[in-house]
């Protein structure tokens, strides 16, 4: 210590390449290492570049913000606590160690004397040591999770095991090397490396300086070999995500997930929908290489949760496998060419694995829970829709009941084959104008097929109309002129039909000079808000929860009764997750309920689908694999007496599930409009 | 095998009751906002033909008799890869019955050439007469089997499966033959591929007038007059449920039983 | 006015449809002849004779069973001799198959699914349901003969006439074209799907149970009721899903679409998907504890009671009423 005191901290440094001879060999080895790694990256980049164009470099400020949040701060990753923490430790640990190595390179190879003084002590010694320890803790947590906790959502591969061992050994040998150098050189600054000094003292207790020098020499080369090995191998493993994840997050879709489906140019498209890798956009292909196999998407997938085949993670991984085995780049060189009469996919996808089988693809409710939860911004759901499109439009092979819904949409503009109701049956006995009677309504009430053509939902629609009348809103309905917005057609995969219906609706609304649209169906809402603008239909659309909140806020609608029952709100996917509207319905409910709202564990943007999206409400699920029953169980786990919903599809799905499972319990399912209407006393009505 | 499938375009049978209206003067249903669709049993017939063609080589011709709008049914058949399509166009104002339809179809079929198998739907979802197939067979002087749901080619002829009230029968038949097709789990109509729908718009449809078939309007008209709709009305439908009331549950059950019994007896 | 009734009677029994068919014919004035193409027992012949002026039992090679071309040839021959104004057939598969062809052969005009018959200016007027039951049409057949198959069960059987008609056995021999075409088609196998049961789609009477029954046992109770009524049993999706009854029983949007004369819904609330399956039922009635259950909106009449208290006594009452 006396020696140390005599030294000037400003001169603090250490000898780089101490105890190492033949260091030229390192530079020689670096060449093949970088070549191998570089080729690995280059190969993938070429493959991505074979994809179709996608505009994902606009709005740079938003993108940088996204990178800061989800890369630097690891916000999305941290949503899973355990995994989030170790990843955070490992992420910052590895970055710090890499930076330390770069400092060494600048100092030693570029002869810029920066590894000196306080910077050397605070950063290069102390900080790096601490972060190294944190990275070790991260690796330990990783090992605990992979070998002890063994969550179902992980993929257990040899690759993962070896990567984990490699990281551990590299970190460990790093500390050993540091300790032995401190010991052998009697480094006066050794105390600034807390782990190093411990290793140093322990080692000196069992071995002499000369021994440590020889072990150090061998270990140094071993450490170097492992590091170079890892660098060379990484692009060929899931560690590629170190590059792809930030890139993928930067090029993510910035819109609501509700607006992510691609448009098809029916005149030019080689195939309608996708069944060959090169038909994906470069971003889709980049997605595949960004996957870290974390499995969060599959763990929140409603279809997978109830035991179905569908697994977004495995779809991505199987596609990644196809991408690995494909020679996409050579195809690019040949050019994509014109579409022949019978389209033959160059790199077929559908049916190549169980996860990519038609059955699995058509289990998706398009709820986008997978997209929402993915820490690296992979878009699983839109890819599923791309594949569905191929089965629907090119093959015409998809579940019969979805075919029935599509045929019904084609022939009568609604998906409810066999309904006995007309568009205006719900309004029987109610007195209000259709669009023919009223010139410029304040708002057009877009009832939607779900609200008009299903017996159960007539009640909700009537409640909403009554509320509007009560608030003296000058509204009108299209009546028989209304047709489906096209949402089910689009989600099932019939983009052609979607465009036909959408174009027709936009035309109708323009003819009537409609500016403001109100709807109680989040699917219609999403289509109006995110999809019609791309087809030239700009309307201001509001979901009834937002609109009713507005009416109350403006004092136009007064509630004078309170609901005594405990209410829980089930967020419709197309309202909450797809469009970010989660507060309005809760505020409304809180106003009418005398008790605080109950919440299910999965709610808001992390809500769990009722099972009715993506055309699934037209399909009979196997009795033991019903998504609506799973969600009903989650609702029944609260102490609610009313499950409030804001979507006609959710209403019927949830009611069916609740009625099946409720037993003797008093609990019902109501649309928010019904709850609100009940909050107006009969005298005031 | 040369197959001819007759298609009929009808008013969408799924039109909800509240939207269904009729003209009591002309004895016709009013289309209103409803669509025109291909009769489902005709679609079953086309599906049966397509499946038959998948198993053994053949050529499918779709034929319809109706207003110009009926071309849509033919376009759909072409989208499903029927080889050719023929429309016998008539005046949409005149309504036709099974007898005139059979007469016209027979004339068109003779003009189109020789066919091995002529398929019709068992009945149409509008008038549901179920007569055209049998009448057509007689017009053409061919044998006829009704309610067929499956066809296999067998040697020179075909083996058919047809539904009966209590089960099914296997029928061996020589060609040429007329069959009426009913629905089964097997012949659920497929839906066309989008690309084929787009392509079908470019295919040609043979279009004939009655005069092209050597038929005069009077001839068709006099044939049609043999069967005339003299009235068409909407049956009265009680809207409200009549709840059975009574002083005791026994009284209610008694009344309920009586009502059931009278219906059971008349059924 | 000369009428013919063609009795195909594959079961060779004087059954309810046959009785209804004869009653329909007797409702029209004039001479009534019954033609039976094939052999039947003497009892049956006698019963037929009790309803008509004359009965002709045809015999021909191979006529012991129904073959389309043969029977058509025989009928053409026998009918044209009689020069009838009206020919009536029942609603079975074979009758439906023959009706238009016989009209074609006899130079007449045909119609099917007649629910009632009426003479107007010597022409037969047929009332039938059209547009899937949404409308009713009256069609006049102005060519002779008018060949019509009737919804035989819609007609109440009539008592035998005071004097029985004549009975003639006629041996028929086909010649020329008719004889040549006999072999054009041949029914080689006939299968009945588990005797006595009718496909749900074709059932006239249906008793269905739903979620409210709470288990498979109450379906046994309902079975007794169904047996007494002569009805088929069916169920809602909930009951099928629960495994209480086979999935083949399921009526609804995704199950079977039925069109019975009477549909009795027991403990079925009436979810829309179920209602879509019974849209074509003529009369719907329900037993349910909930007066507001949607099913009642589709009922002509209904009983608001717990099925547990109703089904047993109801079965007994119906047994007494229907015997």
Image (cartoon, rainbow, N blue to C red):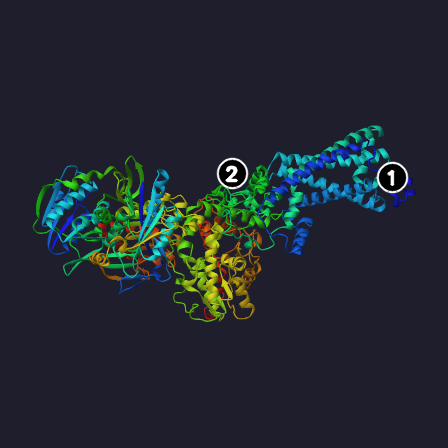
Q: Is residue B5 left or right of residue A28?
A: left
Which residue corresponds to the image point at 66% horizontal and 47% vertical from the top-left? A246
Q: In the rendered view, tell whether residue B170 sits above or below residue A418.
A: above
Q: Nearer the viewer, mark 1 or mark 2?
A: 2
Q: Label 1: state its secondary structure.
A: loop
Q: Position of residue C209 (x, y in %)?
A: 35, 49
Q: Is residue C132 left or right of residue C57?
A: right
Query: Split into 4 quadrants, where in the image is the N terminus of chain C?
Result: bottom left
Q: In the rendered view, tell whether residue A279 sits above or below residue B70.
A: above
Question: Which callout, 1 or 2, points at the residue further toward the start of the chain?
Answer: 1
Q: Is residue A5 left or right of residue C135?
A: right
Q: Which mark is residue A353?
A: 2
Residue C21 seen in the figure? yes
C111 and B89: which is toward the camera: B89
Which chain does tag 2 point to? A
Q: Is residue C229 left or right of residue A365?
A: left
Q: Which mark is residue A370?
A: none
Categorize mark 1 by other alpha carbons within 10 Å: few (<14), some (14-19), many (20+).
some
A463 and C11: which is toward the camera: C11
Q: In the rendered view, tell whether residue A266 sits above or below residue A506.
A: above
In the picture, residue B28 is in which quadrant? bottom left
Q: Which residue is mark 1?
A: A188
Categorize mark 2 by other alpha carbons within 10 Å: few (<14), some (14-19), many (20+).
some
Which chain does tag 1 point to? A
Q: Position of residue C108 (x, y in %)?
A: 17, 52
Asked whether the residues under marks 1 and 2 belong to the same chain, the reply is: yes
Q: Position of residue A214 (x, y in %)?
A: 81, 28
Spatial separation of the CA atoms under disc 1 and disc 2: 61 Å
Q: Label 2: state its secondary structure.
A: loop
């Amino acid at each position: 210590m006396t020696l140390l005191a005599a030294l000037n901290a400003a001169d603090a440094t250490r000898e780089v390449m101490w105890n190492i001879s033949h260091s030229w060999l390192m530079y020689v080895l670096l060449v093949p290492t970088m070549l191998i790694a570089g080729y690995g990256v280059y190969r993938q980049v070429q493959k991505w570049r074979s994809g179709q164009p996608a505009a994902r470099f606009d709005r740079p400020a938003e993108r940088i913000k996204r990178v800061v949040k989800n890369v630097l701060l690891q916000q999305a990753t941290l949503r899973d606590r355990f995994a989030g923490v170790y990843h955070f430790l490992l992420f910052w640990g590895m970055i710090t160690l890499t930076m330390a190595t770069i400092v060494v390179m600048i100092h030693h190879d570029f002869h810029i004397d920066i590894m000196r003084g306080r910077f050397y002590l605070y950063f290069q010694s102390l900080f790096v040591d601490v972060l190294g320890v944190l990275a070790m803790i991260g690796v330990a947590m990783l090992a605990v999770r992979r070998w002890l906790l063994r969550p179902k959502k992980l993929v257990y591969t040899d690759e993962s095991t070896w990567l984990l061992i490699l990281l551990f050994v590299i970190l460990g040998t790093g500390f050993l090397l540091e300790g032995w150098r401190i010991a052998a050189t009697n480094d006066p600054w050794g105390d600034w490396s807390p782990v190093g000094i411990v290793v140093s003292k322990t080692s000196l207790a069992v071995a002499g300086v000369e021994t440590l020098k020889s072990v150090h020499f061998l270990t140094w080369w071993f450490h170097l070999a492992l590091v170079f090995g890892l660098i060379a191998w990484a692009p060929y493993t899931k560690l590629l995500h170190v590059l792809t994840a930030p890139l993928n997050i930067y090029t993510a879709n910035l819109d609501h997930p509700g607006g992510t489906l691609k448009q098809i140019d029916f005149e030019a498209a080689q195939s309608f929908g996708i069944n060959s890798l090169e038909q994906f956009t470069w971003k889709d292909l980049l997605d595949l290489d960004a996957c870290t196999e974390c499995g969060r998407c599959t763990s929140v997938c409603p279809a997978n949760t109830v035991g179905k085949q569908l697994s977004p993670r495995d779809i991505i991984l199987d596609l990644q496998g196809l991408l690995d085995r494909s020679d996409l780049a050579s195809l690019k060189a040949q050019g994509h060419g014109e579409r022949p009469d019978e389209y033959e996919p160059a790199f077929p996808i559908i049916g190549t694995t169980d996860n990519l089988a038609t059955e699995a693809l058509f289990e998706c409710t398009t709820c986008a829970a997978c997209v929402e939860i993915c820490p690296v911004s992979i878009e699983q759901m839109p890819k599923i829709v791309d594949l569905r499109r191929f089965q629907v439009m090119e093959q015409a092979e998809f579940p019969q009941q979805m075919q029935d819904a599509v045929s019904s949409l084609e022939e009568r503009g609604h998906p409810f084959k066999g309904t006995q109701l007309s568009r205006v049956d719900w309004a029987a006995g109610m007195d209000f104008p259709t669009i023919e009677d009223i010139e410029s309504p304040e708002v057009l009430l877009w009832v939607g097929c779900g609200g008009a053509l299903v017996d159960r939902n007539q009640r909700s629609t009537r409640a909403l109309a009554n509320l509007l009348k009560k608030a003296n809103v000058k509204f009108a309905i299209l009546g028989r002129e209304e047709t489906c917005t096209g949402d089910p057609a689009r989600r099932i995969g019939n983009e052609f039909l979607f465009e036909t219906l959408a174009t027709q609706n936009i035309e109708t609304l323009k003819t009537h000079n409609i500016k403001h649209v109100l709807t109680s169906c989040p699917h219609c809402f999403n289509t109006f808000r995110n999809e019609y603008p791309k087809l030239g239909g700009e309307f201001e659309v509001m979901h009834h929860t937002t609109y009713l909140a507005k009416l109350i806020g403006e004092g136009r609608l007064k509630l004078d009764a309170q609901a005594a029952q405990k209410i829980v709100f089930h967020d419709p996917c197309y309202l909450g997750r797809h469009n970010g509207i989660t507060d309005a319905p809760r505020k409304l409910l809180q106003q009418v309920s005398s008790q605080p709202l109950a919440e299910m564990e999965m709610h808001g943007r992390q809500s769990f689908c009722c099972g009715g999206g993506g055309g699934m409400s037209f399909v009979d699920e196997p009795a033991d694999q019903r998504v609506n029953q799973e969600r009903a169980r989650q609702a029944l786990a609260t102490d609610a007496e009313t499950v409030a919903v804001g979507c006609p599809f959710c209403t019927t799905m949830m009611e069916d599930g609740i009625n099946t499972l409720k037993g003797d319990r008093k609990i019902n399912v109501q649309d928010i409009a019904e709850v609100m209407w009940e909050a107006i006393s009969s005298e005031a009505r | 095998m040369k197959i001819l499938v007759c298609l009929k375009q009808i008013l969408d049978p799924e039109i909800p009751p509240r939207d269904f209206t009729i003209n009591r003067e002309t004895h016709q249903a009013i289309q209103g906002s409803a669509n025109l669709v291909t009769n489902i049993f005709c679609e079953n017939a086309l599906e049966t033909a397509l499946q038959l063609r998948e198993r053994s080589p053949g050529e499918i011709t779709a034929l319809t008799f109706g207003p110009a709008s009926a071309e849509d049914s033919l376009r759909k058949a072409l989208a499903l890869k029927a080889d050719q399509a023929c429309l016998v166009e008539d005046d949409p104002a005149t309504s036709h019955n099974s007898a005139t339809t059979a007469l016209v179809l027979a004339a068109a079929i003779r003009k189109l050439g020789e066919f091995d198998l002529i398929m019709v739907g068992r009945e149409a979802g509008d008038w549901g007469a179920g007569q055209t197939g049998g009448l057509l067979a007689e017009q053409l002087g061919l044998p006829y089997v009704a309610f067929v749901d499956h066809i296999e080619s067998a040697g020179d002829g075909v083996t058919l499966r047809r539904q009966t009230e209590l089960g099914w029968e296997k029928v061996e038949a020589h060609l040429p033959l007329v069959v009426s097709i009913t629905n089964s789990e097997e012949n659920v109509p497929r839906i066309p591929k989008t690309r084929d729908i787009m392509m079908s718009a470019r295919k040609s449809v043979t279009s004939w007038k009655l005069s092209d078939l050597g038929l005069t309007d009077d001839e068709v008209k006099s044939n049609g007059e043999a069967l005339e709709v003299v009235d068409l009305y909407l049956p009265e439908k009680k809207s409200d449920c009549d709840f059975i009331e009574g002083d005791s549950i026994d009284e209610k059950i008694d009344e309920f039983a009586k009502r059931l019994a009278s219906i059971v007896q008349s059924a | 006015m000369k009428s013919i009734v063609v009795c195909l009677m594959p079961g060779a029994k004087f059954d309810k449809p046959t009785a209804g068919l004869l009653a329909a014919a007797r409702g029209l004035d004039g001479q009534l002849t019954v033609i039976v193409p094939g052999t039947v027992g003497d009892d049956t012949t006698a019963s037929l004779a009790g309803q008509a002026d004359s009965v002709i039992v045809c015999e021909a090679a191979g006529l012991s069973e129904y073959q389309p071309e043969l029977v058509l040839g025989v009928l053409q021959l026998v009918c044209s001799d009689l020069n009838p104004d009206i020919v009536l057939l029942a609603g079975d598969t074979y009758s439906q198959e023959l009706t238009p062809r016989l009209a074609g052969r006899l130079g007449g005009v045909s119609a099917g699914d007649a629910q009632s018959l009426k003479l107007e200016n010597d022409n037969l007027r047929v009332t039938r349901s059209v547009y899937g039951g949404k409308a009713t049409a009256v069609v006049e057949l102005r060519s002779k003969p008018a060949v019509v198959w009737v919804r035989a069960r819609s007609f109440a059987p009539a008592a035998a006439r005071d004097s029985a008609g004549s009975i003639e056995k006629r041996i028929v021999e086909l010649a020329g074209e008719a004889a040549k075409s006999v072999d054009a088609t041949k029914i080689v196998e006939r299968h009945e799907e588990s005797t006595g049961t009718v496909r749900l789609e074709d059932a006239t009477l249906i008793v269905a149970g739903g979620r409210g029954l709470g288990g498979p046992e109450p379906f046994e109770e309902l079975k007794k009721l169904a047996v007494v009524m002569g009805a088929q049993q069916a169920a809602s999706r909930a009951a099928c899903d629960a495994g209480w009854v086979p999935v083949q029983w399921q009526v609804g949007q995704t199950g079977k679409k039925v069109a019975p004369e009477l549909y009795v819904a027991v403990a079925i609330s009436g979810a829309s998907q179920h209602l879509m399956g019974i849209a074509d039922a003529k009369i719907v009635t329900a037993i349910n504890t909930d007066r507001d259950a949607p099913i009642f909106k589709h009922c002509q009449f209904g009983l608001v009671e717990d099925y547990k208290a109703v089904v047993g006594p109801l079965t007994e009452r119906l047994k007494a009423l229907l015997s």
